[in-house]
Image (cartoon, helix red, strand yellow):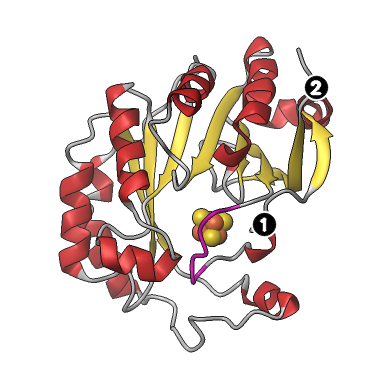
Amino acid sequence: MTTIFGGIHSVETMGTVDGPGIRYIIFMQGCLLRCQFCHNPDTWKIGTGTKRTAEDVFKEAIRYREFWDNSGGGITVSGGEPLLQIDFLIELFTLCKKAGVHTTIDSCGGCFTRDPIFISKLDKLLALTDLILLDIKQIDPEKHLKLTTKSNAPVLDFAHYLRDKNQPIWVRHVLIPAKTDDPTDLQKLHDFISKLPNVKKVEVLPYHTMGVYKWEQLGIRYPLEGTPTPNKEMIKLANKILETDKYAKVQVNKK
Ligand code: SF4
């Protein structure tokens, strides 16, 4: 195995919201998008972060294994955008699979491309990946561009690629008043998701402002200043339109 260093932003030893069970979350450094609601703007800069080998990260993570095994959990890579460091992910998940650890990637798919080199690496990675948490931020192309500074075409193409590979995914949608809660957009998102038989769960994530202090620390103006968090009715409606309750509590088996 060649030694590849990953740029790591941080880790969370006992995560409970990024995949099934209790999970060790590795936040990778670097992202192509600039989501207005991002709660991790400190992960944006590409090429920085603490340089660590997959072996080093894995050895530290595996110390928490007893928590995963009793909860159906495992390891999740998040970010930032983890797929920007695909070579590192392949090394890390190779170690995970040798040890029988459940593996999850939290991605928005913004860097997805049909470039043959990327696809050959992605296929290797998918063979080692149990679950993908796919963040679809806006189904409307123009609103997506405004909200994230990038097109949603690669994101939707990534979803189709994962469908064709029959890769289990959870779709996640951050609900932001006046940005991503329009019932027409939600209906379009629902229609898109309903054509993906590999979707095992759909989650509505209510917008929150817990990361705003990071924007202030970085000296960047927070674009959603004054945007309220969604109320119970908005959340209920979004769940209804996206039919989130249709997805029974499914287990995503290990590969
Ligand atoms: S994709 Fe994630 S990390 Fe990147 S800007 Fe958007 S919310 Fe932040």
Q: Which residue is mark 1?
A: 43
User: In front of the other: label 2 or label 1?
Assistant: 2
User: What is the x, y in percent for residue 98?
Assistant: 67, 10
Task: Compute the Cα span from label 2 to label 1.
Answer: 23 Å
Q: Residues within 10 Å of mark 2 (few under 14, many from 20)?
A: few
Q: Is residue 7 left or right of residue 167?
A: right
In the rendered image, residue 97 lying in the magenta stretch gets the answer: no
Give the camera-side residue of 121 and 170: 121
> Is the residue marked 1 within 8 Å of ligand 1, measured from its CB?
yes
Mark sitting earlier along the chain (2/1) = 2
Q: Amino acid at mark 1?
A: Thr
> What residue is at 17 percent from the left and 56 percent from the top?
188
Quarter where residue 77 is shown:
top right
User: What is the x, y in percent for residue 60?
Assistant: 83, 31
User: What is the x, y in percent for residue 10?
Assistant: 75, 49
Q: Vertically, is 230 above or below 226? A: above
- Dot 2 lies on which element? loop
In the rendered image, residue 35 lying in the magenta stretch gets the answer: yes
Q: Which mark is residue 88?
A: none
**Residue lying farthest bottom?**
226
- Dot 1 lies on which element? helix
> What residue is at 36 percent from the left and 52 percent from the top?
136
Q: Which residue is mark 2?
A: 3
Mark 2 touching mark 1, by CB under 8 A?
A: no
Quarter where residue 7 is shown:
top right
Q: Vertically, is 226 above or below 180? A: below
* Residue range highlighted in magenta: 31-37
Q: Vertically, is 41 above or below 74? A: below
The number of discs equals 2
> What residue is at 46 percent from the left and 30 percent from the top?
131
Q: Which image quarter holds the N terminus? A: top right
Q: Amino acid at mark 2?
A: Thr
